[in-house]
Amino acid sequence: MIITKQKPIDDILKYLEKANKVFIVGCTQCATVCKTGGEEEVKKMKEFLESKGKKVIAAEVWDTPCNLLEVKKRARDRKNELETSETLLLMSCGDGAHTVVIGTGMPVVPGNDTLFLGQSERTGRFNEVCALCGDCTLFITGGYCPNALCPKGLQNGPCGGVKDGKCEVSPDIDCGWLLIYNRLKDTGNLDNMKKVLPPKDHSKSIRPRKVVVDATKKRI
Amino acid sequence: MTLKEKIKNKKFIITSEIGPPKGIDVKTILEEARLLKGRVDAVNVTDSQSAVMRLGSLAVSRLLKEEGVEPVYQLTCRDRNRIALQSDALSAAVLGIENILVLTGDHPSRGDHPEAKPVFDLDSVQLIETLRKLESGKDLSGKELKGVPKFCVGAVVNPGADPVEPELIKFEKKLKAGAEFFQTQGVYDVKTFAKFIDKVKQYNTCIIAGIILIKSPDMARFMNKNVAGIFIPDSLIKEVEGAADKQDKAFEIAARTITGLKGLAQGVHLMSLGWNKLVPRILDAAGL
Ligand code: SF4
Ligand code: SF4
């Protein structure tokens, strides 16, 4: 899931300085779970903007604003409202924001900061456990990713900064490499840690990344 | 004899450390270097230590060489990608600097430019392998080099790491990657160090034990709390507290520790934390 956090409301107001007629779009998926773009948040945002003298033309929660075909369909449905609006306020992730820009051709203001690909531990608690490196080595590191769990992304074991099991960067962060070590030890795979991992192939993650799935190609 | 020759011939090694200034006024550190000359085998030059931006360790290493002091150029993975790391290593070679100590480096968030982008493209194990690759006449991507460098590659190990097993696994990897010598985090307890030596004896490599002076009881407590793998026993802190002359006591403890380490380590690395002028006195006291 994509983890987002609402931007400070003053920042959002500043971005909307020149726009009076606003169309708010939320997202039924990740942003709903993150409480940054569900029904409740979109409604609250509408009320807030109206209290600041803005005209909210529409306030809707779209299903997957990150899906271009969906967005185009919606844009056709809401042609009139979109034409009346000066800007869109996107309460989704950056992917949703971009897709809605493309699908509607409207100016856009992001309401959220897009943070990371995260696991939902329980309501309102999200953890980054994969850094989208494009070259997964979890089979060696026991399912715990050093790219995501170690702030230095080290590949071959802990640095000298680990103290009482915590990372040098913050006592709030468990040392990712100690997690990996314990995991490998518990599962009898400590040998994995003894292998020297080569430097990461960052050419696999050159931006912008693109995937085209050939439906005619046989997989497996 | 060069550091490399001393390592090979199993001679006792004394190294010390200099931190480049923040700025370009090198007068003080060159004075320090002159005082260390002849008393130590080599002097480490730290690389923006604690992620605090300073004059470059490569430039200062070269200045030390011109003073007739053998430098150990510290190179961290923190700020450079593999292109810059290899390029800097070649620059070191062309400037006549043979010794490179490879370090991961502290995370930028710990230093004075916490907004900086961390790099860590290679880790310390991979950087050691990379330096060895350069020595084979090829770069990391397998391209032929024009003129081949020769290095004496060192790394660090922390005998006080807790738990010690992951540290030992990494130590073994560094060794396999081609580290020729190891400098350690500060050692205060000879018995713990002896246990560590027992575990690594089988590898028959050069371990140079770190010595950090206890400048004050507060500093000792601060280090115990904040520096990973450092354990200064209470008895030592009390000893400093009760001493009439704190500086004398710091020397006495350092000299005593060095004496205790003589049969265990192949050398000592003095990290004087700004007291470099006093290093010759510690060495005298330890009979070195
Ligand atoms: S190695 Fe880590 S960052 Fe890369 S894909 Fe796997 S989990 Fe994600
Ligand atoms: S302390 Fe652990 S998690 Fe933190 S940077 Fe070092 S190895 Fe990575």
Image (cartoon, coloured by chain):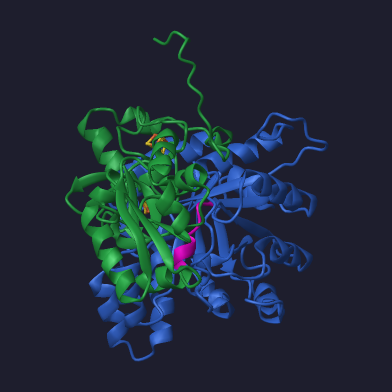
Chain colours: A green, B blue
Give the vertical position of B38 relative to B135 (above or below). below
Give the vertical position of B16 relative to A79 (above or below). below
Q: Nearer the viewer, residue B235 or A167?
A: A167
Residue B187's spot in the image, x, y percent? Answer: 38, 62
In the picture as drawn, the residue positioned furthest to the left comes out as: A122
At x 44%, y 52%, the residue is: A82
At x 39%, y 76%, the residue is: B214
In the picture as drawn, the residue positioned furthest to the right comes out as: B146
Q: Viewed as shown, does residue A190 lie left or right of A114?
A: left
Q: Nearer the viewer, residue A58 or A27?
A: A58
Q: Viewed as shown, does residue B279 lie left or right of B218?
A: right
Give the vertical position of B5 relative to A54 (above or below). above
Residue B200 appears anywhere in the view: no
At x 27%, y 33%, the residue is: A184
Residue B6's spot in the image, x, y percent? Answer: 62, 49
Quadrant hosting residue B210: bottom left
Residue B53's spot in the image, x, y percent? Answer: 59, 69
Q: Viewed as shown, does residue B148 lie left or right of B200?
A: right
Bounds of the magenta segment: B103-110
